[in-house]
C-alpha cells in the first residue's frame, strides 16, 4: 500500500526566504512625548536590513555602556545608551510582530 506522504516529503524548492520579502509593518513606536509616539519604525524595510540595523545599534550601546562604566560623573553615555536601546528594541519588536504572524493562516478550509 503506498504511503500518502513520500519519504522524504516533496518540497517546493522554488520558494525561499528571499522570495518571501518579509518587511517591517511599522506598528512599533518609541520615544513618547506627552503620551504620544514621537518616532516609529517605518514599514516596508526588509527584516534582514532591520535586524542588521538593530545589531549595529546594540553594538553602539555596548560601547556606550563600557564608556559609562569607566567614566565618573558623566551620565551622557548612559542616556545615549538608553535612547539607542529604545530604538533597537522597537526594531526587534516590529520584526517579531511580523514573524509571529508567519506563516499566514490558511483560511481556505
Image (cartoon, rainbow, N blue to C red):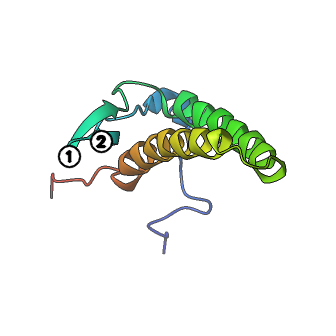
In the picture, residue 59 is in which quadrant? top right
Query: Going by the image, does 95 lie left or right of 58?
Result: left
Closer to the camera in the image, 76 or 51: 76
Closer to the camera in the image, 33 or 17: 33
Tell me what residue is drawn at x 53 percent, y 41 percent. Answer: 88
Decide if residue 65 is in sight here: yes
103, above or below 24, in the image: below
Q: Estimate the spatial distance between the alpha carbons at disc 1 and disc 2, rounded to whole Å.
A: 6 Å
Residue 32: x %, y % from top left: 30, 42
Tell me what residue is drawn at x 43 percent, y 49 percent. Answer: 93
Closer to the camera in the image, 12 or 41: 41
Residue 74: x %, y % from top left: 70, 43
Q: Which residue is mark 2?
A: 32
Query: Which element is circle 1 on?
Result: loop
Residue 78: x %, y % from top left: 63, 47
Q: Are marks 1 and 2 in contact (CB under 8 Å)?
A: yes
1, above or below 22, in the image: below
Query: Going by the image, does 21 lie left or right of 53?
Result: left
Q: Where, quadrant-wise, is the C terminus in this rendering?
A: bottom left
Please give the label number shown on residue 52: none
Query: Which element is circle 2 on?
Result: strand
Extreme residue toward the right, this view: 70
Extreme residue toward the bottom, this view: 1
In the picture, residue 18 is in which quadrant? top right
Which class describes the residues within 10 Å of circle 2: few (<14), some (14-19), or many (20+)?
few
Query: Going by the image, does 10 lie left or right of 32?
Result: right
Residue 71: x %, y % from top left: 80, 46
Tell me what residue is drawn at x 67 percent, y 40 percent. Answer: 77
Decide if residue 12 is in sight here: no
Q: Which residue is mark 1?
A: 35
Amino acid at each position: 500500500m503506498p504511503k500518502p506522504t513520500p519519504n522524504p516529503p516533496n518540497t517546493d524548492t522554488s520558494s525561499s526566504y528571499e522570495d518571501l520579502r518579509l518587511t517591517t509593518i511599522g506598528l512599533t513606536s518609541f520615544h513618547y512625548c506627552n503620551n504620544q509616539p514621537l518616532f516609529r519604525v517605518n514599514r516596508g524595510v526588509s527584516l534582514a536590513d532591520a535586524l542588521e540595523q538593530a545589531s549595529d545599534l546594540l553594538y553602539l550601546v555596548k560601547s556606550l555602556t563600557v564608556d559609562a562604566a569607566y567614566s565618573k560623573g558623566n551620565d551622557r553615555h548612559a542616556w545615549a545608551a538608553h535612547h539607542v536601546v529604545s530604538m533597537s528594541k522597537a526594531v526587534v519588536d516590529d520584526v517579531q510582530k511580523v514573524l509571529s504572524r508567519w506563516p499566514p493562516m490558511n483560511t481556505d478550509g
